[in-house]
Image (cartoon, rainbow, N blue to C red):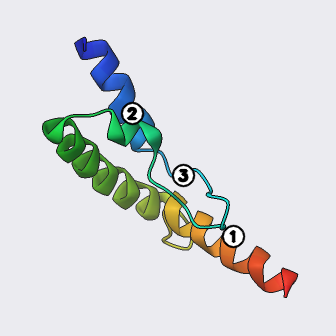
């Protein structure tokens, strides 16, 4: 894997998007599985840093992940 390919995988793995399984649960980002252990640790460290920055910039102090979780909860509560 080239450094550019590794960087792309890390960037993809740090997004808040996660694939939804048939049962409605969320799985890990597919790019995470393509990284080696060092790449996974780097993706984790960057994700923590990014979420902290997002929360600091958000008026409610929430990260994109927190917003995504709240959106899922809200949409599930309107279906019941």
Picture quarter with the N terminus: top left
Q: Residue 66: x and y, percent? A: 52, 69
Is 39 located above or below residue 4 in the figure? below
Q: CA distance from mark 2 to mark 1?
A: 23 Å
The foreground one among 17 and 52 is 17
- Give the secondary structure at mark 1: helix
Vertical comparison of 56 with 11: above or below = below
Q: Mark 1 and mark 3: span between their CA atoms? A: 14 Å
Tell me the residue that label 3 is attached to.
Answer: 18
Q: Residue at x 51, y 52 (%)?
A: 16
Q: Earlier in the sequence, mark 1 or mark 3?
A: 3
Q: Nearer the viewer, residue 25 or 10?
A: 25
Residue 22 location in percent, x, y?
67, 60
In the image, 52: left or right of 39?
A: right
> Which label sits in the foreground, 3 or 2?
3
Residue 12 location (% of width, % of height): 44, 35
Which numbered marker is on residue 11? 2
Q: Residues within 10 Å of mark 3 (few under 14, many from 20)?
A: some
Callout 2: SS: helix
Q: Position of residue 50 (x, y in %)?
A: 36, 50
Residue under label 1: 71
Quadrant where the image shows the C terminus? bottom right
Query: In which image quadrant can residue 20 be found?
Result: bottom right
What residue is rendered at 40% in x and 41% in y?
13
- Mark 3 and 2 residues: CB-CB less than 8 Å, in contact? no
For marks 2 and 1 on the same chain, the one whose residue lies earlier in the sequence: 2
- The residue lying at 25 percent from left, 11 percent from top is 2
In the picture as drawn, the residue positioned furthest to the right comes out as 79
Around disc 1, counting alpha carbons within 10 Å, would you say few (fewer than 14), some (14 to 19), or many (20 or more)? Answer: few
């Amino acid at each position: 894997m080239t450094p550019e390919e590794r960087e792309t995988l890390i960037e993809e793995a740090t997004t808040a998007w996660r694939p939804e399984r048939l049962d409605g649960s969320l799985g890990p980002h597919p790019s995470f599985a393509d990284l080696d252990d060092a790449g996974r640790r780097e993706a984790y460290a960057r994700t923590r840093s990014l979420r902290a920055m997002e929360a600091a910039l958000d008026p409610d102090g929430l990260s994109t992940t927190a917003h995504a979780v709240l959106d899922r909860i809200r949409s599930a509560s309107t279906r019941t």
